[in-house]
Structures are given as structure tokens and as C-alpha cells.
Amino acid sequence: MEYRFLGRSGLQVSELCLGSMMFGERTDEQTSHQILDIFSEAGGNFIDTADVYGQGRSEEILGGWLKTRRREDYVIATKAFGEMGPGPNERGLSRKHILDAVRASLRRLGTDHIDLYQVHVWDDGTPLEETLSTLDALVKEGTVRYVGASNFCGWQLQKAVDLSLMHGWEALVCLQPLYNLLDREAEWELFPVCRAEGLGVLPWSPLRAGWLSGAHRRGVTGPAEGTRVKAEAEAGSIPWSGYATERTWRVIDEVSAIATETGRTAAQVSLRWLLQRAPVTAPIIGPRTLDHVKDNLAAAEWTLTTEQTNRLTAVSTTENLPYPYNLLTRFARR
């Protein structure tokens, strides 16, 4: 496992980040600890969770595992925003909720600090100055070491960067966006901001909830039993019809072809494309089983050729970009 600097910071993280969203929900505690063991033994040091995963259970499971380890060896990331109770101040990015949330996360994780604290989503009910100044105070007191954002759009991210610079507050070091071969909208505005401002990029759902894992091929008429694709479709969060398109099948066809050429799995090809994609720092893998984590980790053991990378990039490029991106692309000079 290689290590990369997170944005412009001096923090080094493994090139794959272990996401723990499944812990305590679809993955029991014993299996979760085994997944953490395998990830750590492979050289992984970067683990991502959130207070809302399993309503805190994910953080508790991770905290239990950390008790058996040397805390300094790991970069622990968590997030705040999600609804954690019935009260009006138990969600969002107000000063009260962030301070309550960080203390609760520290208790569940069994640690005295959080290496990377991220705001989980934009909060249109709280002034951004209130959120950013609170994050700055947490860094100054040593409770939090670095701060980041997730699920922002371009202007929101740029505003956060500019306000922090203007007030001398702790700067964001990274963005955690949805990004994979099927979802490339982050390239339109978010990635230019990240490049210009020196933010690392931590893509979530790098296999798009299993669509890019190889379990589904052209010609199938519905999600396979026991897959996350089926679970998400039944829950209504990622409808089958939203991805069962000709563009998706073309991407999967190319992924499958390159998997055959390289002797790798479709998941490894999809992850490898991300690992070689600027400005990506570390894709967040979210394994549910031991087989999943072993397969995903193998993406760090090899490289795609330039020709293979170009084929994947070309087949997954969004067609008919909306205005103004279509116009800007035509007149791009570099």
C-alpha cells in the first residue's frame, strides 16, 4: 500500500481508505473487526466513518477495535450533520450540534482526538461562518487535527475556502464527493476548485453500490439477489432504472474487457481507474464481507496502462454536457 499526502497538508494516508458504513448494519462486529485487521495488515492506515452510520454503531465498533491497536498508527475520519435524535438541534452544522456531535463521536470512538473531521453535507440553515469558526476552534483546542467537507457543490466549496482564508481559520484539506466511472459530475466544478485550492479528493461509492463490481452485465433485466444493487433498489435510494442505461452497459462492457485482459476483477479495474485519476487521493472502499475487502485491496497491487485508462475515461465521459460546461469544454485551452 502506498501513501499520499492529503491535499496540501503534511498528513499521509493510505491510497485506499476503508469506509465503515456497513459496520453494525449489514456487517456484524466480529466481521467488521476482521475487515479492519485485513486492511491494517495490508498497510492501510486511513479509516472513515460517520456519526449517522448505524446511528453511532459504526463508530462504536471502530472504537472497540482501536483499543487493541496503537492509536498513532491510524488516521481516523468521521463526519457530522446527520439526524441523531428527535430534538431540533440534533442535526445540521450549528455550533451547538457540531460541539455535541464531536463529543459524542469521541466517546464512541474511545479516543481523545479525531484526525479528520468532515461536515457531511451542506447546511442551508446555518451561516457558513458559524460552522467554519467552530471547526477552527476544535482544531485549536486539539480535539480535531484536520477538517474537510463532503457533498458540497462548487460555489459552496469555494466559499468555504475563501471564508477560511479571509478569517484566518483552519483551511479545509479535502473534499469527499460521489465519484466513479458512472458518476463523473464532480469533474465539472468540484475538481477545478480542489486543484486550484490544493484539496485532496476522497471519492465515496467508488463502485457505485456494486454496479461496477462485475455482478451485473448487459442483458440482465433486474438486480441480482443478495447484491447491494438490489438492496439499494428496494430501498429506493438508487433505483434500478437510474443506472440500467445504455451508457452504464457500455462502461461495464469496457471494464469487463479490461478485467479479462489484465486477469483482474471488475471491481479492481474500476478502483484502479480512480487511483490513477487526478486529483483523487484515496477512494473510500466500503466492503461488507471479508472477500470484498480482499478483492478491493488488490486494486493497489498493479497499474492500468495509459491505453486502458484512456479507454475507460472515453467510454465513461458524460455525453451532451449541460450549459455552460458544453461551452466551456469547447473553448478550453488546457
Image (cartoon, rainbow, N blue to C red):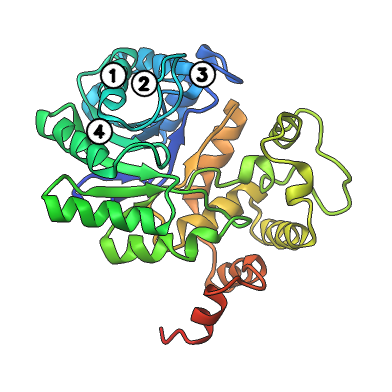
The structure residue drawn at horizontal position 37% and vertical position 12%, both measured from the top left corner, is 64
Q: Position of residue 318 (x, y in %)?
A: 63, 67
Point out the image quarter for the C terminus. bottom left
Mark 4 secondary-structure assignment? strand
Separation (CA) of disc 2 from disc 4 = 25 Å
Q: Nearer the viewer, mark 2 or mark 1?
A: 2
Circle on res. 54: 3
Q: Are discs 2 and 4 less than 8 Å apart at CB?
A: no
Q: Nearer the viewer, mark 1 or mark 3?
A: 1
- Please, what is the three-letter code of the amino acid marked with disc 1? Asp
Circle on res. 303: none
Point out the image quarter for the N terminus. top left
Please give the residue where the numbered disc 4 appears in the rendered image.
115
Q: Are discs 2 and 3 less than 8 Å apart at CB?
A: no
Which is nearer the N-term, disc 1 or disc 3?
3
In-front residue for pair 291/190? 190
Mark 3 secondary-structure assignment? helix
Circle on res. 100: 1
Q: Dot 4: few (<14), some (14–19), or many (≥20) neighbours within 10 Å?
A: many
Q: Position of residue 46 (x, y in %)?
A: 35, 36
Tell me, yes or no, if residue 7 can be seen here.
no
Mark 2 secondary-structure assignment? loop
Q: Quadrant of residue 11?
A: top left
Mark 1 secondary-structure assignment? helix
Q: Quadrant of residue 279?
A: bottom left
Circle on res. 89: 2
